Image: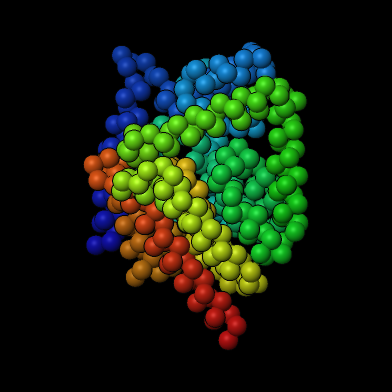
Amino acid sequence: MILIVIAMADVIGVIFFGHLFLNNFSRGAFAVPGDFACFRAAGKLVATEVGGHAEDIAKVCEYTYPPPFLFLVRPLALLPAPESFVVWTVAGLTAFIFAARRVGVPLAAVALAMVSPVSLYGLAIGQNGFFTSALLLLSLGCVEASPILAGLGAGALIIKPHLAMLLPVCFLAARNYTAFVVAAVTAGGMGLSSVLFFGPATWVYFIYHELAVAGTIMSRPWPFGQSIMVSPFVEAHSLGSDVPTAMLVQGMATLAAAVLTWRLWRRRWTGNPLARLLATLALAFLSVPHDCIYDLSAMAAVLAAYGMRDPRYGLEIFAAFCLLMAVYALLSFFTFSTGAMFLVVVAAYGASEARLQFANSTT
């Protein structure tokens, strides 16, 4: 029965997000998806107007990424649009598969995550979720085995820095100062390099204008621009809270997530890393106000892996996750946001599994 629910959720996702993707075909021609078109436009602009016309990026779309993200999208300008979209998609999938396998996610679970609704949505609109998911998996899943790799992954998340908010907490709680220093050096190096390659104007515009765009998105009346988000801020906003109250709710959630993350990572870990990884990923998404369903591919992979280990509870949670994400945008649009509540369930499940493994390893 659970497998049927997962299959139904994937079918719904294929139909809904497949239709979204097929809308890019018009009269036999292919127009790249909107989010990818925005990224490619940014890459083309910096290829021709390095540092001089940073504001032109924002004229194309609601572009809210820091300058180091341009390292990822600048090569997209070297190819025609359809070919660059294929390269972008294949590169993201490759990075995601490598990272998931590197941290011990079974190949079957990786496949389930790749066809989950969150991943299908990211593919349909050409988002960067596979890249950021790969970096999150490496950052959190390689701390003990390869702290340098974990630090590199964490530092590279400067391309979407809010997703890395809890990573310093993890590294410091685990007393893994190598990962912490490597992350700081990597992030600093990428930031400085972006100034050298793209000019200081890109940073000035990001700080004074692109962050304001992000704030505008978050302050819009519910559900416009927020129906695919999963944060406590958005949940409070969807239930009628004004922006200051919703930010207060988010602040309390961020503090709670940081404290729980510290406690999870303070103990020396000897068990299966997937339990702690699952809980930490859920807490990481709870700690920030701006995260979307296409950011959740990493959590989908780890949740699928746990579903294979724990068919009674883990598989049920994964099935519920797939079903919710398949209809999430519509459900949010016509009711209210439920993403944060589900993340709390996943965090509690992962933390309970982590505590159980820790107890078993000390007896």
Taking 93 as reference, is 338 left or right? Answer: left
Q: Quadrant of the N terminus?
A: bottom left
Residue 301 position, x and y percent, is 46, 54
Is residue 73 positioned above or below 27 on the image? Answer: below
Residue 215 position, x and y percent, is 48, 34
Please tell me which residue lies in front, 239 or 88: 239
Q: Residue at x 29, y 51 (%)?
A: 323
Q: Residue at x 72, y 54 (%)?
A: 180
Please tell me which residue lies in front, 329 or 220: 220
Taking 55 as reference, is 123 left or right? Answer: left
Q: Determine the image quadrant of residue 330.
A: top left
Asked whether the viewer can see residue 152, the reply is: yes
Is residue 21 positioned above or below 139 on the image? Answer: above
Q: Residue at x 53, y 58 (%)?
A: 255
Is residue 252 positioned above or below 216 on the image? Answer: below
Please tell me which residue lies in front, 187 or 318: 187
Residue 66 position, x and y percent, is 60, 32
Q: Residue at x 51, y 55 (%)?
A: 254
